[in-house]
Amino acid sequence: MNFKTFLSISALSMTLIGCMHQTSSGAKYQLSDANKTSLQSVVDARSSETKQRDNWRKPAETLAFFRVEPGMAVAEALPGGGWYTEIIANYLGANGQLMGLNYNDDMWPKFGFFSEEAIKGQIARTAQFPSMVASKTTNGIKATGYTFSNAPAAANGTLDRVLVIRALHNLNRFENDGGYRTKALKAMHRLLKPNGMVGVVQHKVAESTSDEGANGQRGYLKESAVIAMFEAAGFKLIDSSNMHANPKDVPGPKDIVWRLPPTLLGAQEKPELKAAMNAIGESNRMTLLFKK
């Protein structure tokens, strides 16, 4: 893959301004200059269409905040179509390992709106993950695909990072109907090395919201609830960032996160509503880093 040349270290420092954060111990963490340059080069090398969401999603700053470095073994929860996969796989390099962790097969029918064919397609994505990685990089990185329930025991204690980016709400919304969140966090814990970390980016709703309105059904969770669920699973919060905060996103009691871009559910054929949703931008999100 031909990466664009990064021309300015000073500009890079501004772009990755979020990569240095105060940890709970008071020490500062920062990627090396070489890793900053490598990460930004990977982000810059993607197509213009793919980069349209970068202003909101801040992939370089996010991965730097999660302390992801080349050569690591990383799991990506719910890789989907591979928006983040392309960046992670190329950044980790030939010595890295990337695991896709999909939702459990029996969770897909619970959404209630997927056709039988669509469910089969979602389930098939798990086994197809290595092929997707190969299609997005030429560095020969080792890739594997599992669900939260079938990652093998041989993988226990092998991961440096698990990245859960906008994928936690569905695990939580079906927690009372199969314990999916509990099982997923347990799987993350067993797969991580000692002191391995989980990076979370999740749609965030106000703490004053009712528990029913913040259970993930609308896409939103409370930050306090996310911290509590990870602590209960044996993790410790070591850092947080407001890089994905959007104070314009103030959902009403019935508003769903998918009303906003890029989905714009219900607004595609309504120009005024579409303009209003675009003016808000992507959702308000928490960014949290936990350690095993």
Image (tube, rainbow, N blue to C red):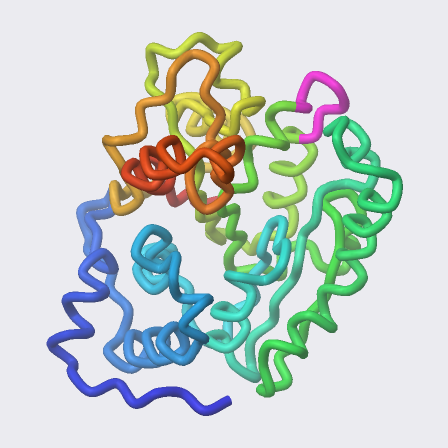
- The answer, for residue 192, to whether it is visible in the render is yes
Q: Reply yes or no: does residue 181 show up in magenta.
A: no
User: Image quarter for residue 125?
Assistant: bottom right
Residue 170: percent from the left, percent from the top?
A: 61, 32
- On screen, residue 249 above or below 31: above
User: Image quarter for residue 208?
Assistant: top left
183 relative position to 117: left or right:
left
**Residue at horizontal 38 percent and vertical 72 percent from the top:** 43
135 relative position to 200: left or right:
right
User: Image quarter for residue 106?
Assistant: top right
Residue 241: percent from the left, percent from the top?
A: 27, 43
- On screen, residue 11 above or below 220: below
Exactly how many numbered labels are in the figure?
A: 0
- Viewer-side residue, 270 vs 54: 270
- The answer, for residue 236, to whether it is visible in the render is no
- On screen, residue 281 above or below 141: above
- On screen, residue 27 above or below 255: below
244 relative position to 134: left or right:
left
**Region rendered in magenta:** 174-180
286 relative position to 218: left or right:
left
**Residue at horizontal 66 percent and vertical 58 percent from the top:** 100
**Residue at horizontal 50 percent and vertical 68 percent from the top:** 88
Residue 31: percent from the left, percent from the top?
A: 28, 69
Residue 27: percent from the left, percent from the top?
A: 19, 53
**Residue at horizontal 25 percent and vertical 31 percent from the top:** 248
The furthest residue to the left:
10
- Viewer-side residue, 21 vs 61: 61
- Viewer-side residue, 242 vs 20: 242
